[in-house]
Image (spheres, rainbow, N blue to C red):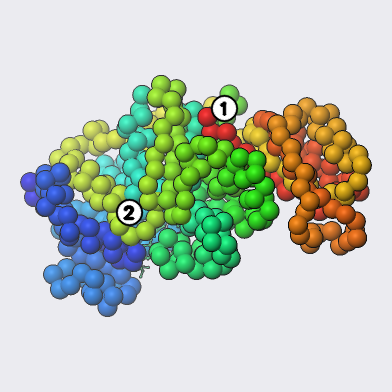
């Protein structure tokens, strides 16, 4: 079989890793793919740096469109990132009849419907294993390995940067800013790191997984997104005392009413395997009706782990040489014709309608009757309490200037599953009590069983 000729757009962290792994493992990859896979041209705005990575045998240009226009190129890898020029280049590559491999979850979560439709019309593949959880073959698992199942839920630690920040802050006592700088140095963070710390990157990824798990279109605009910037150290500590760890989770869950699609910090039981996932590692738990619970673990960011997924997609494409579009795995796992109807029946639910447990922390005046009043409000709303802690607050709340001399204490309450809208109403009442001295902290809790 003839070599697959690949044009690489963007040779930064992931592009550099892809070039290196393809070169290092070329013999092994050829034995798997049935043909050689060779990067013959690279486009990067920084031509000098690109040249220093690939040497003299590969064409290097600054204009990506030169590669797309080259009839000798079979596959284009897009590793530039973002929704702007990347979208144009991917659509142009598809229009030119080239298969596309991309790690760009932002692009696919926002413009996936347009891109996958264009690819289907043209009979080319858009492969994106690297876009979700880096080197973990989770797209492969959801689209193929678990295809027998009615998937009930997917939940994952799918942003390496934030997991790295949470781990380092807890274990080494480093500041948020220090650890973020280190994550950037190690190549984990997005070009705009607010995408990582505000949960947007994880939301891109869970949006893609929700589509292939449930057979619905990609609907990033309907995802609820909350990052880790509002997390406070005492809550991490109290959660541990209650037997939980706090992780930034992406969650997609099918309920009788629709789909929950959300990213936020979550308490998870310390005894679950996923609670031990530290540093830039990722893990995705998938629950299917036939298979039960599966856990997929590995490196979710960095040059070579992500390159591993990019190259796996290239191998898939090489193996499909000559096969027509009908033989391809559908881009979103389900046949395109079945997606729209499904989304009518499975709407993404507003947050008021999600059902989960909650961790609540109220900074209160240390006086008789406060706990009873709060638990009565919860009970009247039908909210059942699972566990409770009272801790002398070891820091004066920045919010309690209105009562600086009162003795204060932290009340920590874990609830059983509750509808979020119901909880919000109860919290509004509790917040208004004169003995509640600061905004109540509320973190969702997932049992993941
Ligand atoms: N870094 C990581 O660990 C992971 C990154 N990704 C995704 O992979 C993609 C690439 O990420 P990184 O390699 O980290 O980014 P990067 O910033 O290291 O590399 C991007 C490269 O594209 C080049 N570039 C920018 N505009 C260009 C243009 N118009 N034409 C040609 N080249 C251009 C830049 O000069 C740079 O070399 C992004 O979509 C990112 O979200 C996915 C998984 C993990
Ligand atoms: N910025 C992302 C990179 C991989 O997708 C992360 O930190 O996980
Ligand atoms: Na992956």
Q: Does the residue labelled 2 lie within 8 Å of ligand 1?
A: yes
Mark identifier at residue 305: 2
Percent of width and height locating residue 71: 17, 58
Please give left or right for residue 407 compared with residue 203 in the image. right
Considering the numbered disc 1 on the image, is that residue within a helix, a strand or a loop? loop
Q: Does the residue labelled 1 lie within 8 Å of ligand 3?
A: no
Residue ID at (65%, 40%): 242
Give the labeled residue for mark 1.
255
Residue ID at (44%, 54%): 280
Q: Alpha-carbon neighbours of circle 2 within 10 Å: few (<14), some, or many (≥20)?
A: many
Farthest left residue in view:
1
Percent of width and height locating residue 255: 57, 27
Percent of width and height locating residue 266: 59, 44
Image height of 396 relative to 53, above or below: above
Mark with earlier residue (2, 1): 1
Judging depth in this view, the residue of 111 and 271 nearest the camera is: 271
Residue 93 in sight in this render: no
Image height of 115 relative to 42, above or below: above
Farthest bottom residue in view:
48
């Amino acid at each position: 079989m003839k070599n697959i000729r690949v044009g690489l757009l963007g040779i930064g962290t992931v592009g550099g890793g892809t070039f290196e792994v393809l070169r290092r493992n070329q013999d092994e990859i050829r034995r798997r793919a049935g043909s050689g896979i060779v990067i013959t041209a690279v486009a990067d705005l920084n031509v000098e740096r690109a040249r220093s990575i690939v040497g003299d045998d590969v064409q290097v240009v600054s204009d990506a469109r030169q590669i797309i226009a080259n009839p000798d190129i079979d596959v284009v890898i897009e590793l530039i990132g973002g929704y702007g020029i990347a979208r144009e280049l991917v659509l142009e590559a598809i229009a030119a009849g080239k298969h596309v491999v991309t790690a760009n979850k932002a692009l696919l979560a926002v413009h996936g419907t347009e891109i996958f439709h264009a690819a289907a019309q043209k009979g080319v593949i858009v492969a994106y294993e690297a876009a979700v959880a880096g080197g973990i073959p989770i797209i492969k698992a959801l689209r193929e390995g678990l295809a027998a199942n009615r998937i009930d839920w997917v939940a994952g630690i799918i942003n390496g940067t934030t997991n790295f920040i949470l781990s380092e802050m807890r274990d080494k006592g480093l500041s948020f800013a220090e650890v973020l700088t280190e994550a950037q140095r190690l190549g984990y963070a997005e070009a705009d790191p607010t995408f990582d710390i505000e949960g947007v990157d994880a939301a891109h990824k869970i949006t893609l997984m929700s589509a292939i798990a449930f057979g619905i279109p990609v609907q990033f605009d309907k995802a609820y997104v909350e990052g880790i910037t509002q997390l406070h150290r005492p809550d991490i500590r109290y959660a541990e005392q209650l037997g939980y760890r706090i992780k930034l989770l992406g969650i997609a869950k099918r309920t009788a009413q629709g789909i929950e699609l959300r990213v936020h910090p979550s308490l998870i039981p310390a005894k679950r395997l996923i609670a031990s996932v530290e540093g830039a590692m990722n893990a995705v738990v998938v629950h299917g009706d036939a298979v039960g619970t599966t856990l997929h673990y590995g490196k979710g960011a960095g040059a070579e782990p992500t390159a591993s997924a990019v190259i796996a997609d290239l191998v898939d494409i090489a193996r499909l040489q000559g096969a027509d579009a009908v033989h391809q795995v559908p881009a979103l796992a389900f046949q395109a014709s079945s997606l729209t109807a499904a989304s009518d029946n499975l709407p993404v639910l507003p947050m008021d309608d999600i059902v989960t447990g909650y961790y609540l922390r109220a900074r209160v005046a240390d006086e008789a009757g406060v706990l009873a009043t709060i638990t009565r409000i919860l009970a009247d709303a039908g909210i059942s309490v699972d566990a409770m802690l009272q801790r002398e607050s070891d820091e004066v709340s920045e919010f309690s200037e209105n009562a600086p001399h009162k003795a204060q204490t932290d009340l920590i309450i874990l609830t059983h599953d509750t509808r979020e809208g119901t909880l919000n109403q109860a919290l509004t009442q509790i917040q208004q009590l004169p003995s509640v001295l600061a905004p109540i902290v509320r973190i969702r809790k997932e049992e993941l069983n």
